[in-house]
Image (cartoon, rainbow, N blue to C red):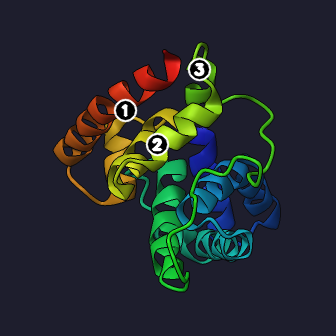
Amino acid sequence: MGDDEFVLVRAVAAGDVDAFEELYRRHARSLFGYIFARLGDRQLAEEALQDVALALWQGAGRFRGECSVRTWLFAVARRRSLTLRRRLPRERSMLDEELLPPSDAPGPLESTLTSVSRTAVRQALEQLPILQRETVELVYLHGMSGPEAAIVMNVPLGTVKSRLHRALKALAPLLEEVAS
């Protein structure tokens, strides 16, 4: 975890609104994208992001620094998304990029897309089981390490590795089909 973010969290715990706004500015875009991919509903995603911001404000004093601030916030976002997903009437397309907020810079996954279109990758990802898809998104779209993804998903590192392995194995033939 960056020392500056730890300092900001401590400042938030002491009631510093500017520190809170700085942390929110740093993480809101990627958190919203992650939450929206889980829910597929903009209004619920905005509600969940507000809940994550509230958790930051109220929970900053309890943050022990055992993981990065980003990882902590993603874990809160995941838990809130799982709760809110129960409100949804049916499974939605979770990677509708037209509805995601614009990004200033491409993420790790977007940077590696050369010969295969984003649409094809999105369609292939949607064919994966939800937990495998989420693991791929955390690692490749949000650039998390395996241990960070394990914290967010509240599973052992070995589970993240096996989900990622199975997901990539399943994606290979799907993407080869499209690339041909």
Q: Is residue 148 above or below residue 80?
A: above
Residue 155: % across, % down: 24, 56
Nearer to us of marks 3 and 1 is: 1
Name the amino acid, label 1. Leu
Task: Give me the disc on residue 125.
Answer: 2
Kindly indicate whether the residue at mark 2 contacts the one at mark 1 (C-beta within 8 angstroms): yes
Q: Is residue 167 above or below residue 117?
A: below
Residue 123: % across, % down: 53, 42
Residue 85: % across, % down: 51, 77
Residue at label 1? Answer: 171
User: Which quarter of the figure has residue 13?
Assistant: bottom right
Kindly indicate whether the residue at mark 2 contacts the one at mark 3 (C-beta within 8 angstroms): no
Could you give the CA–CA distance between mark 1 and mark 2, rounded to whole angstroms? Answer: 7 Å
Residue 115: % across, % down: 59, 13
Sequence-first disc among 3 and 1: 3
Name the amino acid, label 3. Leu
Residue at label 3? Answer: 113
Sequence-first disc among 1 and 2: 2
